[in-house]
C-alpha cells in the first residue's frame, strides 16, 4: 500500500487525517542553516562546484565525524551528494556486479532491496526478531556468507525498528567482514537521535574496518531539510574515487547553495544535537503512551524516530487491512509492517508510526486512536 498517496487522496477528499507515515520532521530548519543557503544564493553561488563538493563542506564533514567519533578521514575521502539515497545508490553501483550477493538484515528501510537489485545484485535476507532486540548473530551472518558475498548493509539507528547496534555486536560483524573479505555499507542517518544511554558506534571506527567500510549519511533528518536532498559518503580512497565517478555521471554535484549551508549545519554545537535527542525522546514517550493505551504492543525504539507496533490484538487479517481501517475509520495514517519485509507474510501484524511531529499532532493522534478497541 502506498500510504503517502492514499493519505493525500483522503485529505483531498476532506478527511481529517493525522499522518504518521512519512519520516518528515516537523521541527523547523534552524535559521542559521536557512540563512546560509539564502546568503549563498544572494552571492550568486549558484554554479557548478567540483564533483565531490566544495572543500569547505567536505572539511566540515570530516571534522564533524572526527569530533564525534575520533575518525581521521581526509577531505578527499568525503563526497557531498544529492541526498543519502543517492549516496547509497552510488556505493552499490560501485560495489555490486550482476550476481553479487549483499546481506540485508530484516526488517529494513524499503529502498535497500530495490537499490541492490537495480545493480543486478542478489539480496540475502538475514532475519532478526523483536524478542531478541533485532540482534544480528555471528552465526547467522556466517551461514549467509557465500563466495559471492560482496557486502552487508547496516542501518543503525535503524528504520523501522529503532534498533541501535552495540559495540560487541558490531565487533562480531567486523571480525566476519575481515575473515571473509566482505565490505560494510552503513546508513548512519539517525546517528544523533539516541535515547537513554545508547551510544552510536560507526563500524568504520573499529580496528580493521576503516578500509572496508562505506559510510552514508545525510542532512535530511538531523537538520529538518528532507526536501533539500543533500547527503554524503565517507570511504577509503579506492572506494571514494569510484563513488565520485558514479556521482559525476549521475548528477555532477549537489546544489551549490546547499553545500554552503551544509558547512554551517555541520558546525552546530553539541548542544544542538543533545537538544534534538531530548525533544525526540519526549515525543517517543508521548506516542508510546498513546499507542499502548489504545491496545498496541510497542517495540520500544532506542534511536531514530519510529516505533514499530504489533497490531494482532485488533483482530484484522493483516497489516494492510488494519492500516486501511486506521485511515478510513480512525483518521490516522501509518505504514504497514510488511513494507519492511521481503518474505511472504513478514510483518503482517506490524505497523510503523513516525513520531517526529508537533505536539499538537501527537495530541490529535491520541484523540483519534482512542476510537480503537482491541478485540
Image (cartoon, rainbow, N blue to C red):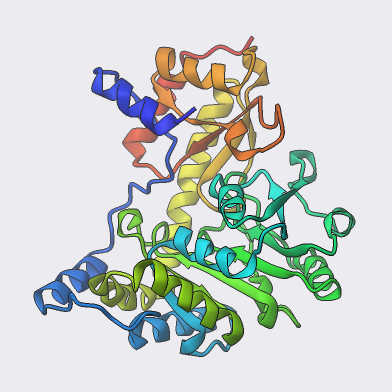
Q: Is residue 141 left or right of residue 72?
A: right
Q: How far from the left and from the top, in percent, is residue 306?
A: 53, 43
Q: How far from the left and from the top, in percent, is residue 135?
A: 77, 51
Is there any visible trace of residue 192 in the rendered image? no
In the rendered view of the protein, which quadrant contains the C terminus?
top right
Q: Is residue 293 left or right of residue 125?
A: left
Q: How far from the left and from the top, in percent, is residue 88?
A: 53, 62
Question: Quadrant location of residue 40?
Answer: bottom left
Residue name at image x 34 percent, y 41 percent = 358
Residue name at image x 71 percent, y 34 percent = 343
User: How many discs mark residues in the rendered view?
Assistant: 0
Q: Nearer the viewer, residue 331 or 3?
A: 3
Q: Is residue 252 left or right of residue 374?
A: left
Residue name at image x 66 percent, y 25 percent = 349
Where is 1 relative to 164, above or below? above
Q: Nearer the viewer, residue 109 or 120?
A: 120
Q: Is residue 356 left or right of residue 89?
A: left
Q: How far from the left and from the top, in percent, is residue 255?
A: 27, 69
Where is 354 relative to 184, above or below? above
Residue name at image x 33 percent, y 83 percent = 50
Is there any visible trace of residue 265 in the rendered image? yes
Q: Nearer the viewer, residue 271 or 25?
A: 25
Q: Nearer the viewer, residue 238 or 325?
A: 238
In the picture as drawn, the residue positioned furthest to the front comes out as: 98
Question: Quadrant location of residue 139?
Answer: bottom right
Where is 163 relative to 68, above or below? above
In the picture as drawn, the residue positioned furthest to the top comes out as: 375
Amino acid at each position: 500500500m502506498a500510504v503517502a498517496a492514499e493519505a493525500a487522496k483522503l485529505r483531498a477528499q476532506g478527511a481529517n487525517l493525522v499522518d504518521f507515515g512519512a519520516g518528515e520532521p516537523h521541527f523547523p530548519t534552524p535559521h542559521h542553516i536557512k540563512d546560509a543557503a539564502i546568503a549563498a544564493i544572494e552571492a550568486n553561488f549558484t554554479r557548478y562546484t567540483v564533483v565531490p563538493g566544495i572543500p569547505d563542506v567536505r572539511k566540515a564533514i570530516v571534522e564533524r565525524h572526527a569530533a564525534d567519533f575520533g575518525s581521521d578521514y581526509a577531505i578527499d575521502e568525503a563526497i557531498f551528494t544529492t541526498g543519502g539515497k543517492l549516496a547509497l545508490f552510488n556505493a552499490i553501483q560501485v560495489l555490486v556486479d550482476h550476481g553479487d550477493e549483499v546481506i540485508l538484515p530484516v526488517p529494513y528501510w524499503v529502498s535497500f532491496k530495490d537499490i541492490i537489485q537495480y545493480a543486478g545484485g542478489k539480496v540475502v535476507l538475514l532475519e532478526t526478531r523483536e524478542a531478541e532486540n533485532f540482534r544480528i548473530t555471528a552465526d547467522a551472518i556466517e551461514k549467509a556468507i557465500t563466495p559471492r558475498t560482496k557486502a552487508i548493509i547496516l542501518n543503525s539507528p535503524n528504520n523501522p525498528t529503532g534498533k541501535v547496534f552495540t559495540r560487541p555486536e558490531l565487533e562480531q560483524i567486523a571480525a566476519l567482514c575481515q575473515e571473509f573479505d566482505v565490505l560494510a555499507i552503513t546508513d548512519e542517518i539517525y546517528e544523533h537521535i539516541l535515547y537513554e544511554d545508547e551510544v552510536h558506534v560507526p563500524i568504520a571506527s573499529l580496528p580493521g574496518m576503516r578500509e572496508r567500510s562505506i559510510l552514508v549519511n545525510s542532512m535530511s533528518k538531523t537538520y529538518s531539510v528532507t526536501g533539500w536532498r543533500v547527503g554524503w559518503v565517507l570511504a577509503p580512497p579506492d572506494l571514494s574515487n569510484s563513488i565520485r565517478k558514479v556521482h559525476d555521471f549521475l548528477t555532477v554535484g549537489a546544489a551549490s547553495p546547499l553545500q554552503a549551508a551544509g558547512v554551517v549545519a555541520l558546525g552546530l554545537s553539541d548542544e544542538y544535537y543533545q537538544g534534538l535527542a531530548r525533544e525526540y525522546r519526549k515525543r517517543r514517550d508521548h506516542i508510546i503512551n498513546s499507542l499502548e493505551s489504545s491496545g498496541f504492543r510497542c517495540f520500544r525504539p532506542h534511536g531514530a524516530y519510529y516505533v514499530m507496533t504489533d497490531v494482532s490484538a485488533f483482530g484484522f487479517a493483516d497489516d494492510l487491512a488494519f492500516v486501511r481501517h486506521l485511515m478510513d475509520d480512525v483518521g490516522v495514517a501509518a505504514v504497514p509492517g510488511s513494507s519492511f519485509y521481503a518474505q511472504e507474510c513478514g510483518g503482517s501484524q506490524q505497523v510503523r508510526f513516525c513520531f517526529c511531529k508537533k505536539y499538537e499532532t501527537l495530541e490529535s493522534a491520541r484523540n483519534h486512536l482512542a476510537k480503537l478497541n482491541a478485540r
